[in-house]
Image (tube, grey):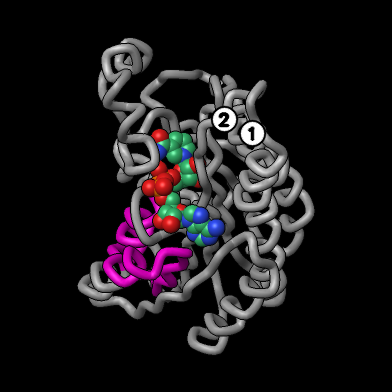
Amino acid sequence: MLLENKVALITGSGRGIGREIALKMASEGASIVIADIDEKTMAEALAEVQAKGVKAMSVKMDISDNAGVKEAVDKILAEFGRIDILVNNAAIFRQAPFLEMTLQQWQQTCDINLTGLYNVTSAVAPCMVANGKGAIISIASVDAFQGCLNYSHYAMTKAGVVGLSRTLAQELGPHNVRVNAIAPGIMLTEMTRDRVEANKEAYLARVPIGRIGVPEDIANAALFLASDLASYITGQVIHVNGGMYFG
Ligand SMILES: NC(=O)c1ccc[n+]([C@@H]2O[C@H](COP(=O)([O-])OP(=O)(O)OC[C@H]3O[C@@H](n4cnc5c(N)ncnc54)[C@H](O)[C@@H]3O)[C@@H](O)[C@H]2O)c1
């Protein structure tokens, strides 16, 4: 088991890629914290993780709420005593062509996708530093590297995830805390289902491996980065995209 005796907090793990990461890490023996803004999906994910026989809890968390995140992290520390693995996965993806975008739309995406990362990481990193170890994995996107038509705010936040991860790798490395990012390509989840189904042939033509990605593809990379197999890997972006973009 790759993650025995580790505690993993995964944001946005009620559904999609986050839920799959939680299940994968549970399969490798980690204790799991399901964190999401949506209580219904969170309860379903918690039940699935518990069925794997590991310790698990759920905490409702809006990652854009700084005080609420701190309270949630305190609850986790009261229950588990530490957090060894943080997966910054929660994000939103809302269409807004730049010429029509309102400041409110721009800010909402920044508040969740970027400031959300600050809120959660700044609440969790001190406990990793105190323990002298930790692994932080943040989910970026291929869109950070190639842009995303009609989602400029989203692409901008995902580029920010990369810059933050590379910088934190330098600041937290001396404390034995590794910080990496994963850049998924086109994955089939509820976030992208309509878009993927409407453009399937065009997408497939761009993916040398010849299939649309599934959440498990990302979960496998997250498991590797969280485990001691990656103990000399920090400040990196792993592109998991079937060869669509060789960045
Ligand atoms: N699906 C793709 O094709 C794709 C591609 C590249 C990157 N990504 C990234 O992967 C990650 C997961 O995406 P997904 O496809 O599973 O999306 P999803 O929409 O299926 O899941 C996102 C989860 O985050 C939660 N969430 C949203 N706002 C939140 C908030 N303020 N606080 C806490 N939780 C919140 C949602 O409730 C949901 O459970 C995201 O960071 C996304 O940007 C996805």
Can you give x and y, in whole percent of width and height, for residue 134 in the image?
60, 64
Instruction: Please tell me which residue is depicted at 37% across the width and 61% down the height of the picture.
Output: 14
Give neighbour class at mark 1: few <14, some 14-19, many 20+ (Cα, 10 Å). many
Identify the amino acid type marked 1: His
Judge left or right: residue 130 versus residue 190. Answer: right
Name the residue at the right extreme: 171
Instruction: Please tell me which residue is depicted at 33% across the width and 68% down the height of the picture.
Output: 40
Residue hosting label 2:
96
Q: Dot 1: what SS?
A: helix
Is the CB–ligand 1 distance for label 2 below 8 Å?
A: no
Q: Are marks 1 and 2 in contact (CB under 8 Å)?
A: yes
Verify whether residue 27 appears in magenta.
yes
Judge left or right: residue 135 versus residue 36. Answer: right
79 above or below 175? below
Can you give x and y, in whole percent of width and height, for residue 98 in the image?
65, 24
Q: Which residues are magenta?
A: 17-45
Can you give x and y, in whole percent of width and height, for residue 227 in the image?
46, 57
Between 106 and 167, which is closer to the camera in this rendering? Answer: 106
